[in-house]
């Protein structure tokens, strides 16, 4: 599953010195915190005392306004950018010119040209490390499964006109089907006979086992809640060559199911550690693109299985609803300063997909393992962010921590970040960034010293040292041309 696990197996002399320094520092810090205890006793006691705690619902962890308005997908920075690029009037008038060309530079320009503006990717022209033809080809291949499946579907279904409606995450729907204006159709015909599981626990066990077989690294189940469904979805009309179509269609649609969903199966996919170390680059983007292909493959398989069992499903990557709160409610992890989900297993280096269904199934409970408290003192993502988009407020309740623009969902206790600034940097970079994920101390592969560092993040008295330890070990660096150049030379 984790192809990069072997990379750090050999501990060099330099590592040994670092480990020595870490141990000395931890012992010294422990002596301050608790002079009579050994390090092991302190770690064990503290980890045990503050290890992941279960909670009944997401509302027990984050303050959520009961009158919170459901988020409109058109207000995501991606949507705003693509609407801008296609010359479509946005949902809200505050559309930001900063976002011009950003989406198309990042998503539809693997040949080095933005198909709408005709702008050329300067990094590719220079064959800059991390943006060479080989690097971009790696990313194109990684997204291949998602692109092939969605465009093949659109080509077949769009018949004579070859015209499709696209979600900004790349999912395509033929215009002819879209025009029927049906609520979200279950994508596949369900089997007429319903399979009855003996208990809802049996159902959960079977579905989780199947999800793992189909390729998920993490799986949890959340109860269906309308508040996490997009208020409207935004569809972008273009033909199979990626060109905008002239025809007038309503691109903002209410999200409605044609069945009553009871639960949401949330799937998590690890993104490759080694590739992510080179962020921001096309090599790092390839790990993200692999995530998108896996999201598509696994969620489709699970949807096929459920419909064969006689249940309705709608599967989605980033579409239909917001993924992070669902993943929290499904017990996959916690929210963070950078706004992404942090898991115990892979930190923020995960992609999420979901399958909505009407199967009766036991749901999971949210858990906490100290992320919010650690984020309050860490701020590493905010310091490293090239566009300064991440809030530096100490606490989520600090007065300067306010919504920036329409791209922020409001009414939730969280750090507010400027997604428009973030995506604008992606556009300038002609590719994704994800430096925040790369530098996050939770973004580690499994090794004993990583475990030790993670344990420290759970100990209130030692949290402020954990960030320094991360740097002592040489982790959390980003944008290194050396790493980008050496990527293809490292042995597999
Ligand atoms: S992706 Fe890059 S620009 Fe965006 S928030 Fe993260 S570090 Fe900042
Ligand atoms: S880098 Fe630090 S502050 Fe940012 S999300 Fe990770 S732990 Fe939190």
Image (spheres, rainbow, N blue to C red):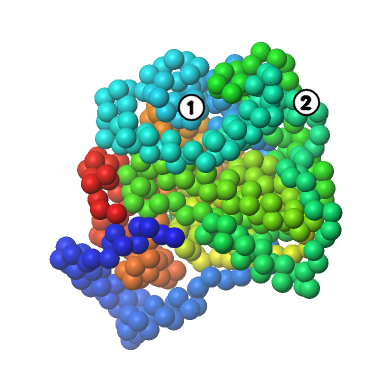
Is residue 264 toward the left or the right of residue 102 in the image?
Answer: right
Is residue 66 toward the left or the right of residue 11 in the image?
Answer: right
The first of marks 1 and 2 along the sequence is 1
What is the crowding at mark 2: few (fewer than 14 residues within 10 Å), some, or many (at least 20)?
A: few
The label number, if any, that marks residue 216 in the structure image: none
Q: Residue at x 31, y 62 (%)?
A: 6
Residue 60: % across, % down: 66, 63
What is the crowding at mark 1: few (fewer than 14 residues within 10 Å), some, or many (at least 20)?
A: some
Q: Nearer the viewer, residue 392 or 177?
A: 177
Residue 380 lies, with reference to residue 78, above or below; the image says below
Residue 44: % across, % down: 41, 80
Residue 367: % across, % down: 58, 66
Q: Residue furthest top?
A: 246
Q: Residue at x 69, y 56 (%)?
A: 305
Q: Residue at x 77, y 25 (%)?
A: 179
Q: Nearer the viewer, residue 124 or 141?
A: 141
Q: Residue furthest bottom?
A: 36
Q: Nearer the viewer, residue 136 or 368?
A: 136
Q: Residue furthest left?
A: 13
Q: Quadrant of the N terminus?
A: bottom left
- Residue 183 can be seen in this image: yes
Residue matched to label 2: 179
Q: Residue at x 72, y 47 (%)?
A: 314
Is residue 458 toward the left or the right of residue 326 in the image?
Answer: left
Cβ at disc 1 under 8 Å from ligand 1: no
The image quadrant of residue 142 is top left
Estimate the spatial distance between the alpha carbons at disc 1 and disc 2, rounded to whole Å.
25 Å
- Residue 373 can be seen in this image: no
The label number, if any, that marks residue 108 in the structure image: 1
């Amino acid at each position: 599953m984790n192809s990069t696990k072997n990379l750090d197996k050999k501990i060099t002399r330099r590592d040994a010195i670092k480990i020595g320094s870490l141990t000395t520092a931890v012992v010294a810090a422990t002596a301050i915190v608790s002079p009579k205890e050994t390090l092991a006793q302190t770690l064990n006691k503290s980890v045990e005392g503050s290890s992941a705690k279960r909670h009944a619902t997401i509302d027990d962890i984050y303050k959520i306004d009961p009158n919170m308005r459901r988020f409109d997908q058109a207000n995501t920075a991606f949507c705003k950018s693509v609407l801008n690029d296609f010359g479509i009037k946005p949902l809200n008038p505050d559309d930001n010119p900063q976002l011009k060309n950003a989406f198309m530079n990042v998503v539809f320009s693997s040949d080095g040209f933005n198909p709408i503006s005709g702008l050329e990717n300067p990094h590719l022209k220079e064959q800059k490390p991390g943006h060479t033809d080989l690097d971009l080809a790696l990313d194109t291949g990684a997204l291949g499964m998602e692109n092939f499946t969605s465009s093949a579907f659109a080509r077949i279904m769009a018949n004579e006109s070859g015209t499709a409606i696209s979600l900004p995450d790349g999912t395509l729907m033929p215009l002819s089907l879209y025009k029927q204006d049906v609520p979200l159709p279950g994508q596949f015909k369900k089997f007429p006979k319903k399979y009855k599981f003996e208990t809802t626990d049996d159902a959960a066990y079977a579905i989780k086992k199947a999800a793992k077989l189909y390729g998920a690294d993490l799986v949890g189940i959340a109860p269906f809640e309308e508040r996490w469904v997009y208020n409207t979805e935004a569809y972008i009309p273009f033909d199979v060559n990626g060109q905008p179509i002239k025809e007038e269609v309503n691109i903002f649609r209410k999200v409605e199911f044609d069945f009553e969903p009871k639960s949401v199966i949330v799937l998590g996919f690890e993104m490759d550690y080694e590739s992510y170390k080179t962020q921001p680059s096309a090599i790092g983007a390839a790990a993200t693109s692999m995530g998108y292909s896996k999201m598509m493959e696994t969620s489709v398989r699970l949807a096929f299985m459920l419909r064969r069992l006689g249940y309705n499903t709608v599967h989605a990557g980033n579409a239909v609803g917001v993924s992070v709160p669902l993943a929290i409610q499904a017990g996959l992890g916690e929210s963070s300063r950078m706004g992404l989900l942090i898991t115990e297993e892979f930190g923020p280096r995960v992609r999420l997909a979901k399958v909505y269904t009407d199967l009766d199934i036991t749901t999971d409970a949210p858990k906490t393992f100290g992320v919010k408290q650690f984020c309050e003192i860490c701020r590493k993502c905010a310091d490293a962010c090239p566009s300064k988009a991440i809030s530096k407020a100490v606490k989520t309740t600090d007065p300067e921590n306010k919504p920036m623009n329409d791209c922020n969902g409001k009414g939730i206790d969280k750090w507010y970040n400027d997604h428009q600034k973030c995506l604008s940097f992606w556009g300038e970079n002609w590719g994704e960034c994800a430096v925040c994920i790369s530098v996050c101390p939770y973004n580690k592969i499994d090794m004993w010293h990583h475990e030790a560092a993670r344990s420290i993040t759970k100990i209130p008295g030692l949290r402020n040292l954990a960030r320094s330890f991360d740097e002592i070990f040489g982790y959390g660096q980003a944008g290194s041309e050396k790493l980008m150049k050496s990527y293809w030379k490292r042995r597999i």
